[in-house]
Amino acid sequence: MDEFKIVEIKEDILSRNNEQAKDIRREMREKKIFFLNVMSSPGSGKTTLITEIINGLKNDYKIGIIEADLDSAVDAETIAKTGVKVVQIHTLGACHITCQMSYESLSALGTDGLDVVILENIGNLVCPAEFDTGANKNLVLLSVPEGDDKPLKYPLMFEVASVVAITKTDVGKIFDFSPERAVENIHKRNPDVPVFITSAKLKQGVDEVVNYLRCEIEKVKRG
């Protein structure tokens, strides 16, 4: 049999991506900009929670939003109503944001004068978790309709989380979902991660998320 060569493509891609992530973090640190990457499955309430976060922070900080989608500008149009700076990017079928995409998006947004940048990543519990975007923190959402077992089924997403928000708790009675069991499962993957129980519709738990982010923003601004 002829000899053949095994090429570790994924490892090489991730290695180059991680190096670029360091560059982005360094640039954001120099500009004292807090960069938040928001990840979850489709329909978990990312755009709704981001809107509430913007409303809780925009009086004190200059905010820019990067909306990533396979297509359409629906979420960007929703976010634009808050009055903050928004850029829409289309991944042309890619199921995640790489650091190169992140860098190009930050350039298109224009970060001069901003205090906070929020990236709404592609709705997916697998691929986005594999690629470091250069963000300071990863906010991961777990919605009640998804089920409280998702942290066990999609471990990496919850392992890379800096903070988790359990969303749509206002429909908890309709689904077999236990917040306590969800938190337990999240902590099996990431023992120290903060978890907030929220309902954007009922305005419950959102202030706690905003206050957590405010503390993280101030840490970055203090250098």
Image: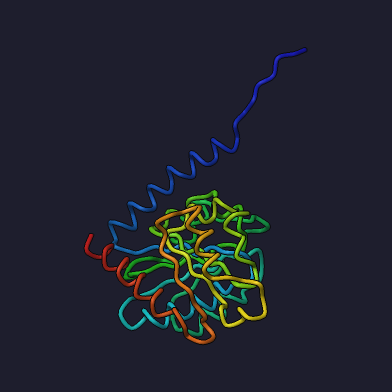
User: For the image shown, how many numbered marks are present on the structure?
Assistant: 0
Q: Residue at x 64, y 67 (%)?
A: 146
Left or right side of 2 for 111: left
Q: Residue at x 50, y 61 (%)?
A: 184
The quarter of the picture where the N terminus appears is top right
The quarter of the picture where the C terminus appears is bottom left
Residue 217 in the image: state x and y as whole percent.
31, 67
Farthest residue in the left direction?
A: 222
Q: Nearer the viewer, residue 169 or 214?
A: 169
Farthest residue in the top direction?
A: 1
Looking at the rendering, which quadrant does residue 107 occupy? bottom left
Q: Nearer the viewer, residue 105 or 165?
A: 165
Residue 174 in the image: state x and y as whole percent.
67, 80
- Tell me which colouring the rendered structure shows: rainbow
Farthest residue in the bottom direction?
A: 202
Q: Is residue 192 above or below residue 83?
A: above
Q: Nearer the viewer, residue 86 or 134?
A: 134
Residue 211 in the image: state x and y as whole percent.
34, 75
Q: Is residue 14 above or below residue 129?
A: above
Q: Residue at x 55, y 69 (%)?
A: 88
Q: Residue at x 42, y 83 (%)?
A: 55
Left or right side of 25 for 142: right
Q: Is residue 48 above or below residue 93?
A: below
Left or right side of 99 for 211: left
Looking at the rendering, which quadrant does residue 72 occupy? bottom right
Q: Nearer the viewer, residue 154 or 186?
A: 186
